[in-house]
């Protein structure tokens, strides 16, 4: 309609909601059809509920880009979780799918979170989950095959100058660190980065690499300093 659109909310059993034209975009709209069209899906925010009239008002413009991104990622994860659970149920034989789903959601909040935890923790992650052991085994197996462990990157900018006769070789030896990637930024600066499952373990590995460079520099007539890259 020129003054807004009637929408349905799939997450609430297709409850009807109204999107006023003033809530479509942050500026004045001459033609609503330039911004929305019938049949499309949008991430919206509920900003008013009138229980006496059973009326729900929603907004597109009040949704930030970060909120939109998070919601779309959540929907994607939910769909993937459903698909993985279907595969696990088929692989485990005769299982009450409805009861299993209810148990998983009660324990983890959503299906995909269950598979993420199973990928990281294996049997221990599903220890409290009240589902058949065959289904647990199938979930763990499928999770480890289909879900990559999350990785974070930590980095530091290293400044290193070696003054000995074998300066170039000394630089190579000093900057040699297991699992670390080095990028030349222009003498004497280098970017050292590495990946890890989490920031805690990443920080530990990075600090160990920096300590190695520091110790080498002190023994081999080198100037060394570093700064962390956020």
Image (spheres, rainbow, N blue to C red):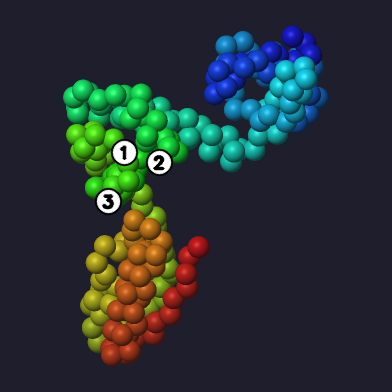
Q: What whole-number distance in Å separates the C-alpha atoms at marks 2 and 3?
A: 14 Å
Q: What whole-number distance in Å separates the C-alpha atoms at marks 3 and 1?
A: 13 Å
Nearer to us of marks 3 and 1 is 1
Tell me, yes or no, whether the two marked residues, 2 and 1, touch with CB atoms within 8 Å.
yes
> What residue is pinned by disc 1?
130
Nearer to us of marks 2 and 1 is 1
Query: Residue 97 at what x, y percent from top left?
Result: 31, 24
SS type, badge 2 = helix
Q: Is residue 73 left or right of residue 207?
A: right
* Residue 171 visible somewhere in the drawing: no
Q: Residue at x 37, y 73 (%)?
A: 207
Query: Residue 165 at what x, y percent from top left?
Result: 25, 87
SS type, badge 1 = loop
Q: Residues within 10 Å of mark 3 (few under 14, many from 20)?
A: few
* Residue 130 visible somewhere in the drawing: yes
Query: Residue 45 at what x, y percent from top left?
Result: 66, 30
Mark closest to the chain's N terminus, 2 or 3? 2
Viewer-closest of 181 and 98: 98
Q: Quadrant of residue 191?
A: bottom left
């Amino acid at each position: 309609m020129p003054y807004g659109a009637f929408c349905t909310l799939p997450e609430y059993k297709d409850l009807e909601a109204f999107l006023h034209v003033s809530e479509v975009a942050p500026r004045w709209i001459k033609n609503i059809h330039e911004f929305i069209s019938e049949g499309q899906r949008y991430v919206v925010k509920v900003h008013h509920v009138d229980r006496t009239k059973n009326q729900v008002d929603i907004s597109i413009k009040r949704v930030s880009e970060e909120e939109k991104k998070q919601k779309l990622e959540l929907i994607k994860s939910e769909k993937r979780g459903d698909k993985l659970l279907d595969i696990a149920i088929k692989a485990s034989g005769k299982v009450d799918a409805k009861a299993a789903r209810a148990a998983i959601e009660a324990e983890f909040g959503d299906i995909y979170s269950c598979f993420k935890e199973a990928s990281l923790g294996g049997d221990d992650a599903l220890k409290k989950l009240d589902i058949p052991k065959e289904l647990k085994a199938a979930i763990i197996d499928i999770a480890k095959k289909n879900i990559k462990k999350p990785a974070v990157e930590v980095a530091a900018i290293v400044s290193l100058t070696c003054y000995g006769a074998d300066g170039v070789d000394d630089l190579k030896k000093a900057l040699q660190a297991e699992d670390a990637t080095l990028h030349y930024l222009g003498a004497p600066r280098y970017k050292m980065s590495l990946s890890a499952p989490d920031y805690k373990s990443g920080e530990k590995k990075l600090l160990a690499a920096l300590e190695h460079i520091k110790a080498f520099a002190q023994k081999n007539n080198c100037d060394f300093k570093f700064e962390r890259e956020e």
